[in-house]
Amino acid sequence: MKKTPLENWIIKRTGITPENPDALKSYQLEKVLEALCYAKDNSRFYQKQLESIDPRQIKSWEQFEQLPLTRAEDIKNNPFDFLCVPQSQIARIVTLNTSGTSGPKKRIFFTEADLQKTVDFFDYGMRSLIDNTDRVMVLLPGQAYGTIGDLLKKALDRTGTVCVVYGLLNDLEAVEKTMIENEINCIVGIPIQVLYLSRSKAASFKHIEKVLLSTDYVPQALVIELNRKFGCQVFNHYGMTEMGYGGGVECQALNGYHLREGDLYFEIVDPCSGKAVADGVTGEIVFTTFNRQAMPLIRYRTGDIGAFSVDACQCGSFLRTMKKVSGRLKNRIQLAGDVTFDLKELEEILLADEDLIDYQVTIKDDQTLLIEVSLYQYETSKAKEAQLQRCIETHFLKNHGEVMQIEVKRSPLQKPDQLVNSMVKRKIRDWRKESSSE
Ligand SMILES: [Zn+2]
């Protein structure tokens, strides 16, 4: 098994040696403290947030872990307060429409140097699954300068690897044509879109040997299906725009991500207390950027649920591994009778059904879930709806000891680029909150 290429990359970029892996943590502490000073000196937000703290007095991780966390709302409320450089030096602004409603939006800024760091990470990260004999198609936005597809193309150009950036899946026929004409054997894309492509164009998908899934956590049902039907190796990438798109990527052990440790420092914290948890324990993923010019982030809460692995990776790297992200805190829902369930549980049931294209889960009230599904086969959809309903009712009874009222309804088939769950991070709609806030 090939060792993760991130190991060599991190050694090169940080100057540490593999004989002394602990040096990585010392390097990161030094860099994180530099980032703290830089953020406090240059951003209005951190001037306030770290008002009573002298970053130059921080000497240890224990002290660092006392610092306040940064929330997504902080960026939403005033993104410009995070800026550390004049606006003339900004090469790319990403506006994230996270809630889908009007109101403040998250904006993330990058300088040219910030974007180049991402290209560097993508270059080495992609080597986990490909070499320059592979032919890659990217189903992510890539038209504009500094978009994820654009940066990925620049990364693969460095090694002379063929890379066709198609953009988001909007037309199955056109994507199939691109795959055939370019003899594609590797696809990078969004989980639900790649699944849809594989189910709709199975004959062409047979040539795909490797898949890298990105932008949202990946249901296991999807990995199993691609593996079983096409013999694909399915790699997960973990990242978000705030990290500079990229955060970590699986090695050939396919058992969790190695992280972008030369640019980012990751922690797992208890989401209620904010305190660090032990390795192996599940909590919220928090990260700190270093060497970031436009918009450094200190202890930023991702809202993602994860854990560090306690075992060394099978690939033989000294780098630690983060287990695959197992969902989002926002998709963990409390219902009547103290039942807490996770969207992921339902997804594993829904996505395992090969007739399903898309779905939307809505909490109607404390006892009722509405699940709207789009299916390929209209003729059998009535029977399918009843079957899904039974499966999910049984799941709740078995796993939570509660009887839930489940309504499964068919929703009209959408075009691929209009799939509810494909472009944004998948989420549950909660009518209880919508009615109380209106
Ligand atoms: Zn590994």
Image: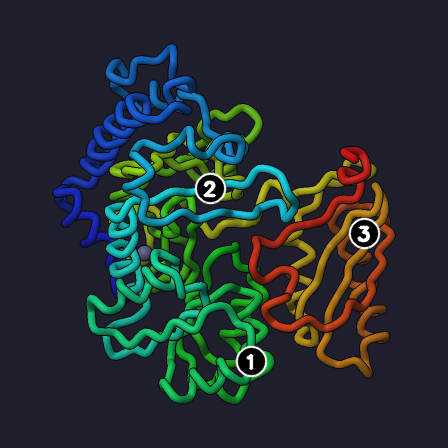
Q: Position of residue 38 (x, y in %)?
A: 27, 26
Q: Position of residue 130 (x, y in %)?
A: 30, 71
Q: Which residue is mark 1?
A: 172
How far separated are the C-alphas under marks 2 and 3? Answer: 33 Å
**Left or right of 165 on screen, residue 170:** right
Q: Position of residue 431 (x, y in %)?
A: 79, 44
Hey, what amino acid is under mark 3?
A: Leu
Task: For label 2, count other residues whose C-alpha is less than 10 Å away and answer few (under 14), some (14-19) or many (20+).
Answer: some
What residue lies at 78% left-to-right and 51% top-to-bottom? 396
Hey, what amino acid is under mark 2?
A: Arg
Task: For label 1, count other residues whose C-alpha is less than 10 Å away and answer few (under 14), some (14-19) or many (20+).
Answer: some
Quadrant that contains the N terminus:
bottom left
SS at badge 2: strand
> In the image, is residue 303 above or below residue 32?
below
Instruction: Please tell me in which quadrant of the rendered image residue 332 appears.
Output: top right
User: Which numbered mark, 3 or 1, is in the foreground of this view?
Assistant: 1
Hey, what amino acid is under mark 1?
A: Leu
The answer to whether residue 247 shows anywhere in this view is: no
**Left or right of 394 on screen, residue 344:** left
What residue lies at 38% left-to-right and 44% top-to-bottom? 243
Q: Are marks 3 and 1 in contact (CB under 8 Å)?
A: no
User: Which numbered mark, 2 or 3, is in the foreground of this view?
Assistant: 2
What residue lies at 49% left-to-right and 87% top-to-bottom? 204
Q: Which mark is residue 107?
A: 2
Image quadrant of ligand 1 equals: bottom left
What residue lies at 52% left-to-right and 72% top-to-bottom? 169
Instruction: Please tell me in which quadrant of the rendered image residue 155 appears.
Output: bottom left
1 or 2: tag closer to the N-terminus: 2
